[in-house]
Image (cartoon, grey):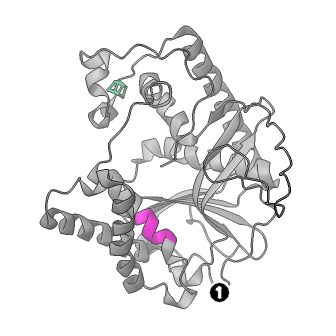
Amino acid sequence: MTDATCPSGRSGRCGAAEIPPNVGTVPYGGAVDEMVLVPARGDDPPEPPDHGGAARPPVPPRPPLGPALSPSRAADFMTCPLLYRFRVIDRLPEPPTTATARGTLVHAALERLFDLPAAGRTREAARALVMPEWERLAAAEPELAALFPDEAELASWLKSATAIIDAYFTLEDPRRLEPAERECYVETTLDSGLRLRGYIDRLDVAPGGDIRIVDYKTGRAPREAYEASALFQMKFYALVIWRLRGQVPRLLQLMYLAEGEVLRYSPDESDLLATERKVAALWKAIERARDAGDWRPRPSKLCDWCNHKALCPEFGGTPPPLPEPALPGAGMVRTT
Ligand code: SF4
């Protein structure tokens, strides 16, 4: 891989001006054919092919799936067990906000950008994707369109999304990249039976085979004291890729687009073994909480952004009765 991390060593964060060209003279390329990718959504096996009118062979029963965990839900439990419960066990709806919708739109536009031939991946081309992607998203999810009471608010919000796209171009040049995968669903099962899964925004594979995992963020970059928790998600993905391919990713790259910051980390096997132990311990804690029905609130500054504050005992609320039976092993929603 011709990419370079920040001069500080295995990890570092760089502002736009400090970031070296991310590819050098050789574009990333190559497929990841050997990577085990499973169907993007849902757990059902694909339909067997139609055999020209003959009776279809019976689909063999699939063994029951084990419990699963995504990095987002793992982070929820670490932040606040009650928040995890609200999201995973109660499955309480969370309406979109202008901030989450902006993240969705920016991710969609950046994903589409790489559909274009390399030379055409300009800032102008990316800007031109914003409106059609918004129209597509709003048509698919009317709740998004309802966020904007009038055209002026929508226009202002679209401008803010376009500004993030512009900022992306200060961090890297997509004309010099050829991602191996985008919005890539990955899943692996640990020896314990716990499935780890999630979506990776972008996977780059260098000609020499080095792997880079890239995640786009549209929110604020964490302060240095919180970098470790930001990197947990990336190490989680790195662990999954390692288990799938037998290769430790060379670089984990978190791109805080709005602030023009990149957090990079080069993991090694001991990092990923530690992540596996952490995930296993976390899952045991989740199982204990589930078995005891004890999902304690853990108040923090993040409560200000919690959708379920009104139901939280810390703020005078009462959680709904636990559904029966609780959903053992539930743990996966779209990672964000
Ligand atoms: S308000 Fe805070 S303590 Fe309560 S569920 Fe949400 S994150 Fe947890």
Per the image, the residue denoted by label 1 is 25
Residue type at tag 1:
Thr
Work out whether residue 173 or residue 306 is closer to the camera in this orientation and state it: 306
Work out whether residue 21 or residue 61 is closer to the camera in this orientation and state it: 61
Q: Position of residue 234 (x, y in %)?
A: 59, 50
Work out whether residue 12 or residue 176 is closer to the camera in this orientation and state it: 176
Residue visible at 72% across and 30% down in the picture = 66
62 up-or-down from 199: above or below: above
331 left or right of 308 in image: right
Residue visible at 57% across and 66% down in the picture = 7
47 left or right of 146 in image: right
Quadrant the N terminus occupies: bottom right
Q: Position of residue 219 (x, y in %)?
A: 36, 54
Residue 108 falls inside the magenta stretch: yes
Tell me the quarter of the picture where residue 3 sits. bottom right
108 up-or-down from 147: above or below: below
- Say if disc 1 is inside 8 Å of ligand 1: no
Residue 57 falls inside the magenta stretch: no
61 left or right of 74 in image: right
Residue visible at 37% across and 85% down in the picture = 124
Please tell me whether mark 1 sits on a helix, a strand or a loop.
loop
Q: Quadrant of ligand 1?
A: top left
Q: Position of residue 52 (x, y in %)?
A: 82, 64
Q: Position of residue 205 (x, y in %)?
A: 70, 70
Q: Which residues are magenta?
A: 106-111
- Residue most extreme to the top: 292
